[in-house]
Amino acid sequence: MDRKTDRFLADIEENLLFFSEIGARFLLKEASPPSVEERILNCQKCPLASTRTKAVPGEGSADADLMFIGEAPGRDENIQGRPFVGRAGQLLTKIIQAMNYRREDVYITNIVKCRPPNNREPNREETEKCKDYLFEQIANIQPKVIVTLGNVPTHFFIPSKSGVTTLRGTFHPFEEILVMPTFHPSYLVRNESNRLLKKMVWEDMKKVMAYLGKS
């Protein structure tokens, strides 16, 4: 190295030593790793990254007792980057409010964080690529109860040949968390005149409320 380079490096070392001595250690800290939400927003793990408008990490309280999990974002969610904001999402919000919660009190997300084309169900590859994000979110939030909305998230947590119609209404253990399967709000929207379906969902939610001390 020439004298100019030596002098330049010496000046840098001297400045760093000075900042360290006066307590400005922030200059020496390593950058914080990206959060799980930031990694989801920039994820390129599967082909859905090339067709999405926005990834949808999820939203709500970082220490929620109650977590709602659907299968994947739909058209409105893909546009806004938020979970459950279409007609089904509006119904889910009403259900949450009837349970004496606000949306911001719970955490809402999906198994897969990007919209599959034509609103099809996510396939195995997509679920496998996304599952670590979901497990990390669950580990960070540590909910007491997870409500699975529809067959896809229900079978993700409860391996079974039975559908949500059979599995709903009963708590199922997942590690130290209880899982309550119920119908997806979009199914209720498509069968709006079926009062029995609404009653069944409400019975499921009443059990959740009782467990969480909200009844």
Image (spheres, helix red, strand yellow):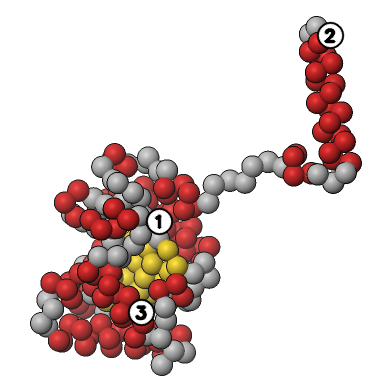
Say whether disc 2 or disc 3 marks the residue closer to the N-terminus: 2
The residue at 36%/70% (across/down) is 68
Quick one: label 3, few (<14), some, or many (20+) residues within 10 Å? some
Relative image position of residue 41 (x, y in whole percent): 41, 47
Residue hosting label 3 = 96
Residue, disc 2: 3
| Residue at screen point 74% across, 40% down | 27
Point out residue 70 in the picture as x, y percentages from the top left corner: 30, 65
Q: Earlier in the sequence, mark 1 or mark 3?
A: 1
The C terminus is located in which quarter?
bottom left
Q: Amino acid at mark 2?
A: Arg
- The mark found on residue 47 in the picture is none
Q: Secondary structure at mark 2?
A: helix
Residue drawn at point x = 42 percent, y = 78 percent: 102
On screen, residue 54 above or below 95: above
Asked if disc 1 and disc 2 are in contact, CB closer than 8 Å, the reply is no
State which quadrant residue 165 falls in.
Answer: bottom left
Per the model, the C-alpha gap separating discs 1 and 2 is: 52 Å
Q: Position of residue 28 (x, y in %)?
A: 75, 39
Task: Please state which amino acid type lies under the numbered disc 1.
Answer: Pro
Q: For marks 2 and 3, give the CA distance.
A: 69 Å
